[in-house]
Amino acid sequence: MSPKTLKFVLFACIVGLCPLTSAPLQAQVAGATLSGTIADVQGAAIPEAKVSVTNIATGVSTTTTTNFVGVYTVPNLNAGDYQVSASVPGFNTVAARLTLTVGQKQELNLSLAVGQIVEEVEVTATAPQVDLTSSTISGNVNATTLRELPLNGRDWASLATLQPGVASVRTHPLGTQASRGLGLHMTISGGRPTQNSYRLDGAVVNDYSNAGPGSVLGQNLGVDAIQEFTVLTSNYSAEYGFTSGGVINAVTRSGSNTFHGSVFDFLRNDRLDAANFFNNANRLPKQPLKQNQFGASGGWRLLKDKLFLFGDYEGVRQTKGAPQTQFTISDAVRAGNVTNLSNGVVSPVPIDPYIRKYLGFFPVPNGSPSCVGCNANVGAFNWTAVQKTSENFVTARGDLKISDKDAVFATFVRDPSHFTLPQALDQVFVNFAAYRQASILEETHLFSASVANTIRLALNKTNGKTNNYYDFAAQAINPLAADTSLNMLPGVAGHGVPLIVLSSTGITPPGQLWGGPTRISGTKFLRSTMTPF
């Protein structure tokens, strides 16, 4: 028997044994899995019992039957409140209510007595102290926590730090963190931030650096678009592959039979904020700040109990100042008088006419003469770098119940953001833009009481870039920065303005005042899974 034939036979045997197993296998699904046993009051299993699981908000019902040992399993259920009913001819009908969370594996066993009496059983949503269905160490952040806790910046992923073993890692200054990822950096159970896996509706949405998703502001928007999420810290099953750290597993909200939505606008500005400690200590004024975070969300039905849509938009407009202290040449050096710092002797240094054209890039010192690092040749230049940021975050989701055995949903996320920030002694500004997009399509088909198939296709695209393709003319604050005749290669755009330094022979331009643009290549993920449970 050839190796290919042997692999085929083994695969066929595994598939053939799936319907015969009394314990359900684990499926790679984004939603919850409900399973259990239907038995009579004496504990004997009841085969062919009808089990119906109905989402209370949408009215969508999934029906299955128990196998020959009375076991049922319903996979890939959206997080929410459900009513579960079990019935079989000759027995009473038992109903129970419970709440399912994202990725949860909930066991619900029901007992049926002989008769036709309808019995209502209330099941609380409190998690048991010992989870008998999974050894995973995890914590859930529900919808109430997401939308009611105050979040500066409304980054829902930051709520993961409420769980034991999860801590945020200090990020790099804004504009320099691109190489390490734009989202919130978290360590889970001591792992590195790039070891974590971020999932949205079952799809991996890590960015180009394998860090968490985020914008140029370093945050992950969409609080009103997230139903809930679970943080898996350790000991999770193999279905959560593609990671050696923790897992942040989130699901988006869907529409329901009744309309639900929100409208919001959060405002912060320098008039409402107090000056920070360092401004007060140095007798500096408050830095300019104006931040508007606004948006709306809504979900409803197109066809009752069948087709639902949900959409969310969130925008950010921010203007924020940051104090800067840099060194510029002194007035004496500008006049050609350079001080030998070893002996204090002032010597006239001829400035070449070609070099003199560059002195306009260096502003007049306005800081304290006694500042650290200041001397007769250089002085402090204090200025405020005002960063302007814009972001538009969009989420859309559609759910369709095709039949009792088929359901499909699609999710689309788009998050373009960019900021401009002055650089190089307030001479030019840098553009930094980030873009991410995720598209997820999933179809679930129930073949029988013990076999289901989930197909999920996902495309995740992220990229970031700085500057505007060498267009220094469009980025110039000082008009001299737009003059290409001053570039290191005169008349050739994109090679930067020389950096003027002091040397023993005079003032020379051996370096570059600011560099050309950098670009971070986008990363695409295409993921398809077909798994039994």
Image (cartoon, grey):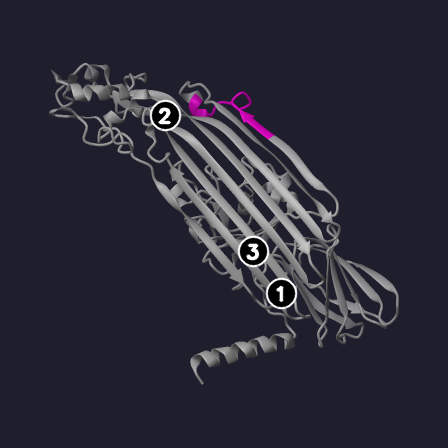
Crowd class of label 3 (few under 14; some 14 to 19; many from 20; radius 10 Å) = many
Of tags 1 and 3, the one toward the viewer is 3
- Give the magenta-colored segment's residue range: 266-279
Residue 298 appears anywhere in the view: yes
Q: Disc 1 versus disc 3: distance between alpha carbons?
A: 20 Å
Q: Amino acid at mark 2?
A: Gln
The percent position of residue 172, horizontal first and vertical second, equals 40, 39
Specify whether residue 379 is in view. no
What x and y, as percent, mark residue 289? 49, 25
Q: Secondary structure at mark 1?
A: loop
The C terminus: image quadrant: bottom right
Q: In the image, is residue 42 above or below residue 473? A: below
Write down the quadrant of residue 70 in the picture.
Answer: bottom right
Is residue 499 positioned above or below 2 on the image?
above
For disc 2, the neighbor class at 10 Å (few under 14, some 14 to 19, many from 20) is some
Write down the residue under mark 2. 324
Residue 202, which numbered label?
Answer: 3
Q: Quadrant of the N terminus?
A: bottom left
Q: Is residue 490 left or right of residue 151?
A: left
Earlier along the polypeptide chain: callout 1 or callout 3?
1
Distance from Cα at disc 3 to Cα at disc 2: 44 Å
**Closer to the camera in the image, 178 or 443:** 443
Q: Is residue 252 magenta?
A: no
Residue 267: give x, y in percent of width and height: 57, 27
Q: Secondary structure at mark 3?
A: loop
